[in-house]
Image: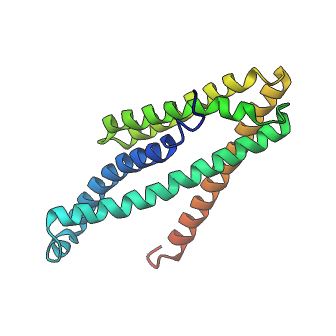
Amino acid sequence: MKNPYVFGFLPLITILLFSLTFSVFTMNKAIELFKVIGVYSGMREFLSDLELKIFLLIILVLVYFMLFSALKLIAETIHEIGMLFFSKDLEGKTISQARGGYVIFFVGAVISAVGLQSIQLLLLIFLATAFIYFIYVVFKLSHSMSLLGTVGLIMFEIIIWSLFLALIIYAIVKLYNGVIASLPFL
């Protein structure tokens, strides 16, 4: 008997692991920043060192959990819209074939514990995991799609993600320029 829901818990655990690793890195950097700007000693009057670290870790895990959950939702939506346009599968059997790829993200999340001291390593592991997962899913789905449909799906996802990333970068640059322009010393 083969249970189709055997990998159902992996996305949650993967998001929690990635959130935890990114949060530990961010927490360490935040504590260093608090020490540099002189806020840390004031915070230590109210909380012990362990309590402060746990408090920061919980807040940061929640923030990263929301971020990675939103990215997963956006990614699944983009992928399923692409499948709507380019797949010939009318029963949805190909989506269940690609669920085995959840293991790829889980392994990437476990490996991300290696990169706790470097944001570059954490981002590299996350992006490499996402790329390997994308290749796996396209390979699995290509058996039920034509060559033109497979190329169309790949191009659709690349274009949508590029537009999404460009929009995020544009918003950050506009926000940064607005904050810099509003500072009185410039």
Could you say which is closer to the camera, residue 51 or residue 186?
51
Q: Is residue 27 above or below residue 91?
A: below
Q: Is residue 141 left or right of residue 118?
A: right
Q: Position of residue 116 (x, y in %)?
A: 31, 42
Q: Is residue 174 left or right of residue 84?
A: left
Q: Residue at x 45, y 42 (%)?
A: 14
Quadrant position of residue 41: bottom left
Quadrant position of residue 114: top left
Q: Residue at x 76, y 36 (%)?
A: 92
Q: Is residue 139 above or below residue 16?
A: above
Q: How is the image coloured?
A: rainbow
Q: Position of residue 162 (x, y in %)?
A: 68, 43
Q: Would residue 82 be seen by someone viewing this image from the given angle? A: yes
Q: Is residue 118 left or right of residue 125?
A: left
Q: Residue at x 79, y 26 (%)?
A: 151
Q: Position of residue 18 (x, y in %)?
A: 42, 45
Could you say which is closer to the camera, residue 60 or residue 14?
14
